[in-house]
Image: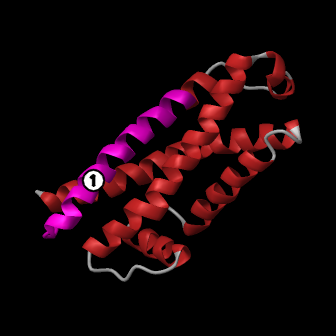
Amino acid sequence: MTIPPQSLVRVEFLTRVVRKESLHLISTDKRLFDDGFTLEQIEKLDATPDVAERVEAFVGRFGRLQDTLGDKLLPLLLSLLGEKVSSVIDNLDRAERLGFINSTDDWMAMRNLRNQMVHEYVEDPSILHCALLSGHDFVPLLTASADKMLDEIERRMT
């Protein structure tokens, strides 16, 4: 794959960003979930600012990595591979076919989950707790997708 000079800067930038976002998400995930994460902790977020900040960081980093991958890196990668860039769902279907993501359905579930974590944040502790636990379960899939896309870019740039 020959990357045009105008795209090379963007590829290099997104590669750096995705690496950082993945590391930050993994770190926050570890700090939030390694000692267990209970509904009681969600119910006491107002009284525990350190936990509230970790929850906020997790939600933000989860959503940011997913957005960067799905809305920026994936379309650029598909374009560089000579694939047609289209709607998000079509791009995800191509990404699944090319092995960059495990499943379009899983990706859409992560996207819906992210929205649920953001919108249910204040209203319903049990929904937020379930959404955060599901997000935690998706972190390995999300970071593995990032790794696969970055590996493909690196492989093709050398």
Residue 36 in view: no
- Which is more toward the observer, 13 or 89? 13
Residue 70: horizontal and vertical position, in percent?
Answer: 48, 62
Say if 130 sits above or below 106 in the image: above
- Which is more toward the observer, 90 or 8? 8
Instruction: Give the total of numbered labels.
Output: 1
Element class at badge 1: helix
Residue 48 in view: yes
Say if 43 sits above or below 4 in the image: above
User: In what quadrant of the picture does the C terminus appear?
Assistant: bottom left
Is residue 51 rendered to the left or right of residue 27?
Answer: right
The segment highlighted magenta reads 1-28
In the image, residue 10 lies in the stretch drawn in magenta: yes
Say if 121 sits above or below 69 in the image: above
Q: Residues within 10 Å of mark 1 (few under 14, many from 20)?
A: some
Q: Amino acid at mark 1?
A: Asp
Residue 88: horizontal and vertical position, in percent?
Answer: 53, 73
- Which is more toward the observer, 65 or 38? 65
Mark 1 highlights which residue?
151
Residue 136: horizontal and vertical position, in percent?
Answer: 62, 39
Is residue 60 rendered to the left or right of residue 24?
Answer: right
Query: Which residue is at 89% across, 41% downward?
Result: 124
Quadrant in the picture for residue 61:
top right
Is residue 2 rendered to the left or right of residue 46?
Answer: left
Q: Residue furthest front?
A: 6
In the image, residue 21 lies in the stretch drawn in magenta: yes
Query: Which residue is at 68% across, 31% downward?
Result: 55
Quadrant in the picture for residue 56:
top right
- What is the magenta segment's predominant secondary structure? helix
